[in-house]
Each structure stands twice: as structure tokens, then as C-alpha cells.
Image (tube, rainbow, N blue to C red):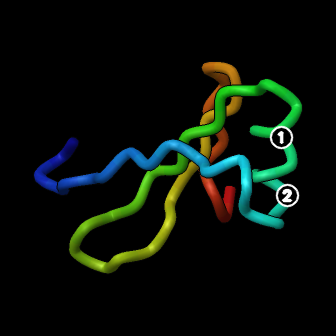
């Protein structure tokens, strides 16, 4: 998007994080990482996207 590459990563439900807890509760959680900066930029939970820092 806009000349940047992103990686979509499905959340591992066994992780102790908040997103792991959502995944354990049968939510579909996908995090998006900017490949150039290696920073997570957004998360999608059940298809609803939230950008970090917004």
C-alpha cells in the first residue's frame, strides 16, 4: 500500500498477550507489521481494523 510492504500475522492463541486472549475466545485476530520498520501498525479483530497510534 502506498509503496510500503506489510506482513499480516495471525495471532497465536497460546500467547499471553491481550490479543492472544481474544484469539482464545474464538475471535479472529490479525496483526499488521510494516516490513521496512518492523513495527506493528494495525490489528484486525473479526474484520474490524484499528490502526495503532490513531
Q: Position of residue 53 (x, y in %)?
A: 66, 64
| Tag shown at residue 22 | 1
Nearest the eye: 7 or 41: 7
Vertical placement of residue 51 versus 36, above or below: above
User: Image quadrant for the C terminus?
Assistant: bottom right
- Residue 37 vs residue 19, the one in the foreground: 19
Mark 2 and mark 1 in contact? Answer it, CB < 8 Å: yes
Q: Which residue corresponds to the image point at 21% horizontal and 42% vertical from the top-left?
A: 1
- Residue 4, above or below 36: above
- Which residue shows up at 69% across the image and 31% down it? 45
Q: Position of residue 48 (x, y in %)?
A: 66, 24
**Placement of 5 over or under 29, stated as above or below:** below
Q: In percent of the image, x 82 and y 66: which residue is there? A: 16
**Residue at mark 2 to residue at mark 1: CA–CA distance:** 6 Å
Of residues 2 and 49, which is closer to you in this image?
49
Q: Is residue 39 left or right of residue 12?
A: left
Residue at the extreme left: 3
46 shown above or below 17: above
Residue at the front extreme, as displayed: 14
Q: Which residue is mark 2?
A: 18
Residue 50, percent across and down?
66, 41
Q: Residues within 10 Å of mark 2 (few under 14, many from 20)?
A: few
Which image quadrant is residue 47 in? top right
Mark 1: secondary structure: helix
Q: Looking at this rendering, what residue extends furthest in the top direction?
A: 47
Amino acid at each position: 500500500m502506498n509503496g510500503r510492504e506489510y506482513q499480516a500475522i495471525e495471532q497465536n492463541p497460546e500467547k499471553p498477550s491481550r490479543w492472544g486472549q481474544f484469539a482464545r475466545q474464538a475471535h479472529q485476530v490479525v496483526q499488521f507489521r510494516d516490513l521496512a520498520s518492523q513495527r506493528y501498525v494495525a490489528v484486525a479483530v473479526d474484520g474490524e481494523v484499528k490502526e495503532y497510534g490513531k
